[in-house]
Amino acid sequence: MDYIRERLPDRIRIPLERAKSAFEDKVTEIVLRTDAPVCIYERKRLFFITENGYLTDSVYAEHLLKASSKEMEQTILRLCDYSVYAFQNEINSGFITIEGGVRVGLCGKAVINHGEITNVRDISTLSFRVARDVSGCATSLLQKLDPLGGVLICGIPGSGKTTLIRDLARQLSCRYRVSVLDERGELSASYRGKSGFSLGLCDVYHSYPKGIAANCAIRSMAPEIIVCDEMGDQSDVDLLLYSMRCGVAFIATSHASSMQDLRRREITSKMINTGAFRYIVFLSADGEVGKLEKIYEMCDARD
């Protein structure tokens, strides 16, 4: 939380500082919207904060803390260390990663040139997703499967997929050669070359596009397992097929609430059909981070 507060203007930071004892241990997300109440999410609950630092669950409460357009601009500058140009690629991708593995999602007015986003102006929403490191949370899962068979971990946003896969990588690195494709910097919480979360003996490719990172890893690091967060497009399907041809197991995550949801979508259905995943794991949606709901064993994954 300190990493978030220090990037905020004083008028927003001070009330959050005053109220931190009431929410800091459970907060999952803090959202600023221009001229709208600051939102604090605790898993499935939503709170607001007053200008004096009191929490309330009523959007109609008096003196709710709101971010002005000027304060949004100040926050963006602080997030980019006063060099927006240096973070332009991340901004165009819809997020900025700061210390502690905090991913700041953003939206505003896109500037399009030849079909590509070249800038985002008038940013109206900043969503600070709090990253948590829970050592040992993958132990029970590892007791139920063979990681060399390939594992796809699925769940809704906020179910703990990234937290779980981070601990999987950390524990597995003591037994196997593991390469981590950390395209968005959330697994290692890397910032300026320093990892905020320990990934044990993993070889970490930070900010590389997944395909390039996998090529580099397979050619130079001889991984037995590759770990990757958030798969879901055609290039990921091609990456799985390439890794299988090279004899490398894949452990990855994907957004899906059920097997039906996973199979209903074209790309995730293709991912399953590659045979890269012997196990498909679904996490609970009850708000407990990383809680296992169901494990499917795909009989043909190794055939």
Image: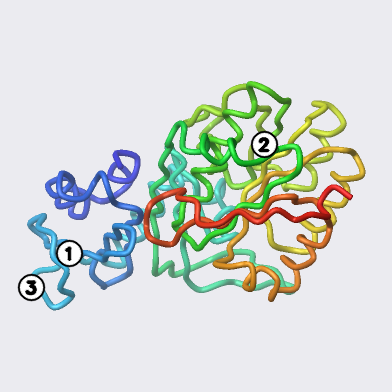
In the image, which disc is placed on residue 62? 3
Task: Check contact, mark 1 vs mark 3: CB within 8 A.
Answer: no
Q: Earlier in the sequence, mark 2 or mark 1?
A: 1
| Residue 68 position within the rendered picture, expressed as x and y whole percent measured from the top left | 26, 66
| Residue 281 position within the rendered picture, expressed as x and y whole percent measured from the top left | 60, 53
**Colour scheme of this structure image?**
rainbow
At label 2, which amino acid type do we have? Val
Q: Residue at x 39, y 69 (%)?
A: 124
Residue found at the far right of this picture: 245
The residue indicated by pointer 1 is: 65
Front residue of 88 and 97: 97
Does dot 2 land on a helix, a strand or a loop?
A: strand
At label 1, which amino acid type do we have? Leu
Q: Give the class, few, some or many, for how many residues have Cα within 10 Å of label 2's Cα (few <14, many ≥20).
A: many
The residue indicated by pointer 2 is: 180
Q: Residue at x 14, y 52 (%)?
A: 15
Task: Check contact, mark 2 vs mark 1: CB within 8 A.
Answer: no
| Residue 107 position within the rendered picture, expressed as x and y whole percent measured from the top left | 47, 68
Which label sits in the foreground, 2 or 3?
Answer: 2
Instruction: Pick the quarter of the image with the N terminus.
Output: top left
Which label sits in the foreground, 2 or 1?
Answer: 2
